[in-house]
Image: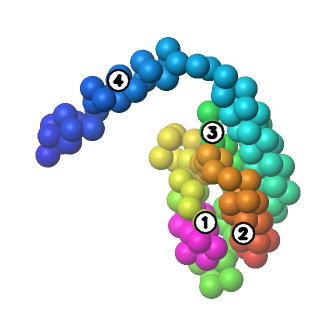
Amino acid sequence: MDFIQGQQTSGATTIAQWAAVAALDGTQEHLARFRAAFQDRRDLVVSMLNQATGLKCPMPEGAFYVYPSCAALIGRKTEAGKTIETDEDFVTELLQTEGVAAVHGSAFGLGPNLRISYATSNKALEEACTRIQRFCASLR
């Protein structure tokens, strides 16, 4: 199964390769607008996460995600009495409590952090970050 899965998911399809060529050879006029939008989203997310109790979010210089540290929240308890022992516990409880999906940083060798994408609208990001702030404030 590992061999079959690797063959099915590890290579870019011909259509994707031609789409990449078209994107690289095509007009680049939209890039400045896209870059500014993603910079605004990044700044919004970093600011709001740094306002959350116990999170520390460094400013990324690239990509479309952040890796805030939740180290200060390890050992705290949820309102239901569950102890947050790992970053995986943190993201699991965040999803169950507030409906916000994040990936535990340990999956990338970056625990106790979490990975949050900001490749969505400012409105969705504000709502998600507000929920994250509320979740962090509720931990005891």
Q: Which residues are magenta?
A: 89-99
Instruction: Look at mark 1 in the image and give the residue it sits on.
Output: 100
Circle 4 SS class? helix
Residue at point 79% right, 41% down?
40
- Proximity of marks 3 and 2: CB atoms separated by less than 8 Å: no
Instruction: Look at mark 3 in the image and give the residue it sits on.
Output: 64
Q: CA gap, disc 3 to disc 1? A: 17 Å
Left or right of residue 28: residue 129? right
State which quadrant residue 31 falls in. top right
Instruction: Look at mark 2 in the image and give the residue it sits on.
Output: 131
Q: Tell me if residue 37 is in the magenta stretch.
A: no
The x and y percentages for residue 109 are 52, 40
Amino acid carrying mark 4 in the image: Gln
Q: Tell me if residue 92 is in the magenta stretch.
A: yes
Label 1: few (<14), some (14–19) or many (≥20) C-alpha neighbours in 10 Å: some
- Proximity of marks 2 and 1: CB atoms separated by less than 8 Å: yes
Q: Which of the two labelled residues, at mark 3 and mark 1, occupies the earlier sequence position? A: 3
Q: Nearer the viewer, residue 130 or 80?
A: 130
